[in-house]
Image: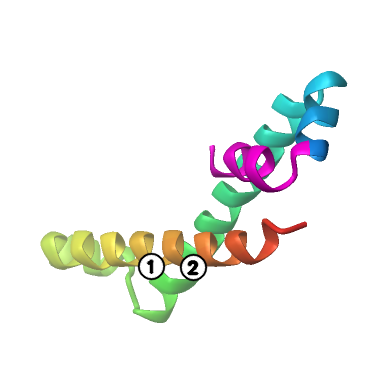
Amino acid sequence: MLRKQFLKEHRPARYQYLLMTGKLTAHLNQVDREAREQVEVLMKQMAEKQSVTELLKMQDQMKWVGLMNKSKEGSRKAALCKYKNRISE
């Protein structure tokens, strides 16, 4: 709901327009969907870069989980950073 809060505080006219035309929920869902897709793509890229494979998962599950969690957290931070840069639109 960062986008909704941002619209309310910094783009009240756009917020009101989306609200009055019934497009606010669709807009928020679109932004959420894009952010989730971006996290997923970044997570896969980070996992590949760190050589996190199914073979590693079979050999050392704890290491695999740790690396996957690290990839997931890093991708969330990167997506949020990109999102914050895009949020001013």
Q: Residue at horizontal 38%, vertical 67%? A: 74
Q: Amino acid at mark 1?
A: Gly
Q: Residue at horizontal 71%, vertical 39%? A: 30
Percent of width and height locating residue 81:
53, 66
Q: Is residue 80 above or below residue 50?
A: above
Q: Residue at horizontal 74%, vertical 35%? A: 27
Foreground pick, 60 / 88 = 88
Q: Is residue 4 magenta?
A: yes
- Are the residues flagged by discs 1 and 2 in contact, CB closer than 8 Å? yes
Q: Is residue 13 above or below residue 83?
A: above
> Which residue is tagged 1?
74
* Residue 3 position by quadrant: top right
Foreground pick, 51 / 29 = 29
Q: Quadrant of the N terminus?
A: top right
How many numbered dots are placed on residues in this image? 2
Q: Residue at horizontal 74%, vertical 28%? A: 24
Percent of width and height locating residue 59:
15, 67
Q: Secondary structure at mark 1?
A: helix
Q: Secondary structure at mark 2?
A: helix
> Which residue is tagged 2?
78
Q: Residues within 10 Å of mark 2 (few under 14, many from 20)?
A: some
Kindly report the secondary structure that dominates the magenta region of the rendered protein: helix
Left or right side of 78 for 13:
right
Left or right side of 63 for 46:
right
Q: Amino acid at mark 2?
A: Ala
Left or right side of 42 for 61:
left
Q: Residues within 10 Å of mark 1 (few under 14, many from 20)?
A: some
According to the image, what is the colour scheme of the structure?
rainbow
Question: What is the C-alpha distance between the residues marked 1 and 2?
Answer: 6 Å
Q: Which residues are magenta?
A: 1-12
* Residue 64 position by quadrant: bottom left
